[in-house]
Image (spheres, rainbow, N blue to C red):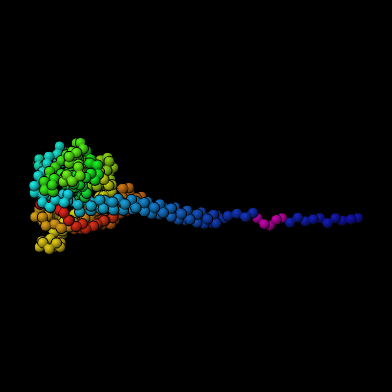
Amino acid sequence: MHHTSARRVYPDTKKSAGFTLVELTIALALGIIISGAAVKLYLESKISYAQDEEMARLQENARFALDYLKREISLSGFYGGIADTSSLFPGTVSTDCDGSGADWALDVSTSMELVNNAPNSGTLATQNGTVFDCISSGDVVDGTDIFSTKRTADAATLDNGNVVVAAALKTWYLKKYDYSSYSWSFLTSAIPSDEATANSTYDYWQYYSNIYYIRDHSVSSDDNIPTLCNVSLINDEMEHRCLIEGIEDIQLEIGIDNDGDGIVDQYKNAPTTADFAKAVSVHLYLLARSVNPVFGYTNNKRYRLGVKNIPAFNDSYIRKVFSTTIKLRNIKLG
């Protein structure tokens, strides 16, 4: 008789792998930490990118504004090479900018004027007493400078009867004849043929009269974008144009030569008319601001524009100061 041995089956002592509550808690905690670090890195990268983008735009705008104004100021007082403008009397334009009723736009007796730290309410009067009534003080960024320049182009439109460039119609020109007679000409048609003839001794120089100021908005009154604007003699009127966004403050300091040696003895941010008569240079300062706020950024910096100290804004806009010194080569300031 055969006996078959019974096979004993032993239970599997290995259990299925899994997480304990402690392991799960640790894993979740590590996941949260890693996710938080990733989110923080992403936000910091996003803020850094936004700052770089706004700073690049700010620098481009500010440098363009600085170069533009530097050229305007350096050419101020240039009237087609005329050394003595005493016989060039003011002309009348349809819409001027001086509340006194004077023919200011075509008056070259003062080539540059300044309103120091203009208020955003009340009268905008220069050191000469000119009232810029074409600018609403409520639109001006409080405490910024306003200044005007007058000049001709740096090259003639008509040179001794030879046409250099086509004349612009409905435009004011300084007209010279025989290098001794000067007058104003508002062209509504082509330069007369007898004048636009070689060796006629007639010259025409296009004329520019501008007032520069900082407006508290660009396009709409609530867009909160400070902008460099001007009032310019266009056609026969002083018209408003806005030029460059993000320019928040502008300050001028006039270099005074007290002893006539051509060297600046002192700079003044609020010069008198007598000081202007001895001006030889200008310190120009611009405070540029990003057009858009940067999320997560707080600007707690203080700024200085010459003698003007500006406290921290504590907002989300990036800012930077730009400056240059400009020699006054042609200016007659009164």
Quick one: 93 or 324, which is closer to the camera? Answer: 93
Residue 286 locus on image (x, y percent)? 24, 53
Q: Which residue is drawn at 27% across and 41% down?
A: 219
Where 3 sits versus 197, above or below? Answer: below
Q: Quadrant of the N terminus?
A: bottom right
Residue 154, how many percent across, how many down?
21, 50
Determine the image quadrant of residue 279: bottom left
The location of residue 235, given as percent across then percent down, is 20, 38
* 184 vs 97, nearest the viewer: 184
Residues in magenta, as a range:
11-15
Is any part of residue 325 visible from this angle? Answer: yes
Query: Disc count in the image?
Result: 0
Q: In which quarter of the image is residue 14?
A: bottom right
Locate residue 148, reporting x and y percent. Answer: 17, 48
Residue at point 16% right, 46% down?
201
Q: Residue furthest right?
A: 1
Q: In this view, does 98 lie to the left or right of 15?
A: left
**The one of 176 and 15 positioned closer to us in this rendering:** 176
Q: Is residue 233 visible?
A: no
Q: Does the magenta stretch include residue 13?
A: yes
The residue located at (13%, 59%) in the rendering is 256
Give me the residue at 28% from left, 53% from top: 63
Above or below: residue 24 compared with residue 99: below
**Magenta residues: mostly which secondary structure?**
loop
On whether residue 323 falls in the magenta region, the answer is no
Q: Which of 66 and 156 is in front in this view?
A: 156
